[in-house]
Image (spheres, rainbow, N blue to C red):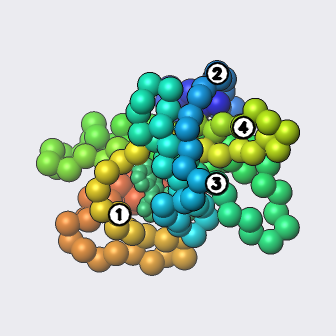
Amino acid sequence: MTFCLPSNINKCILPDYKMKINEKELKVIVAKLPFSQGVLRLAYHGIDEYGKRVVLKLLKRMGWEEMGLKRYLEAIECQTVAYKFAQEFSIVNNDNNKIIKYTVARVAQVKNSAGTFFTIESYIDGEYEKFNNNSGWRNNDMSLEILKTFSHWTHHLSKGQ
Ligand SMILES: Nc1ncnc2c1ncn2[C@@H]1O[C@H](COP(=O)(O)OP(=O)(O)O)[C@@H](O)[C@H]1O
Ligand SMILES: [Mg+2]
């Protein structure tokens, strides 16, 4: 499942906005063990049916919270909206040397009795550096100034959403 890209950011921040979903079957080979993890998710290497490298992510269980489709869809919905914001930002941003891009992720469910969900996105090579977290911490590296600008810009445009 993927969310279609919203046509307009003003529309997609409205409380009753419904993201459209596209569904199709896919085949992926997944590694047995994760290669990395964040606070919320475990990341696994994978290869899709076209031989492209992908990363599959499983949500970590947090207490008794439901680990169903809803939480997976929330994760990719957020990433899809962020993709749209980054696309619009590239039009108004005048620092042409730095571009902000998001990958659009999909949610998939394994076709077996367990029916496990996970997210899939393209593999992105390189070193990962944390820029901020949900409790307000920010990396102060000046080369990351553009991310701060983007963050402010999205906060303003989405009216704090
Ligand atoms: N698309 C990707 N390509 C390559 N490595 C990735 C990708 N996405 C995540 N990773 C690796 O997995 C780690 C955890 O992923 P992340 O999305 O940050 O999880 P969380 O949602 O828990 O923060 C990252 O720090 C990075 O090392
Ligand atoms: Mg992370």
Give the residue number, with chain letter if any, for mark 1.
128
The answer to whether mark 1 is within 8 Å of ligand 1 is yes
Vertical order, 153 against 30 (above or below): below
| In this view, 66 is above or below 62 | above
Element type at marker 4?
loop
The residue at which mark 3 appears reads as 58
Q: Is mark 2 within 8 Å of ligand 1?
A: no
Residue at (85, 39) in percent of width and height? 113
Quadrant where the C terminus sits is bottom right
Q: Give the spatial CA distance, label 2 vs label 3.
A: 20 Å
Instruction: Categorize mark 3 by other alpha carbons within 10 Å: few (<14), some (14-19), many (20+).
Output: some
133 and 61: which is toward the camera: 61
Q: Is residue 144 above or below residue 83?
A: below
Q: Position of residue 24 (x, y in %)?
A: 64, 21
Q: Residue at x 79, y 36 (%)?
A: 112
Label 4 neighbour load within 10 Å: few <14, some 14-19, many 20+: few
Q: Nearer the viewer, mark 4 or mark 3?
A: 4
Sooner in the amino-acid sequence: mark 4 or mark 3: 3
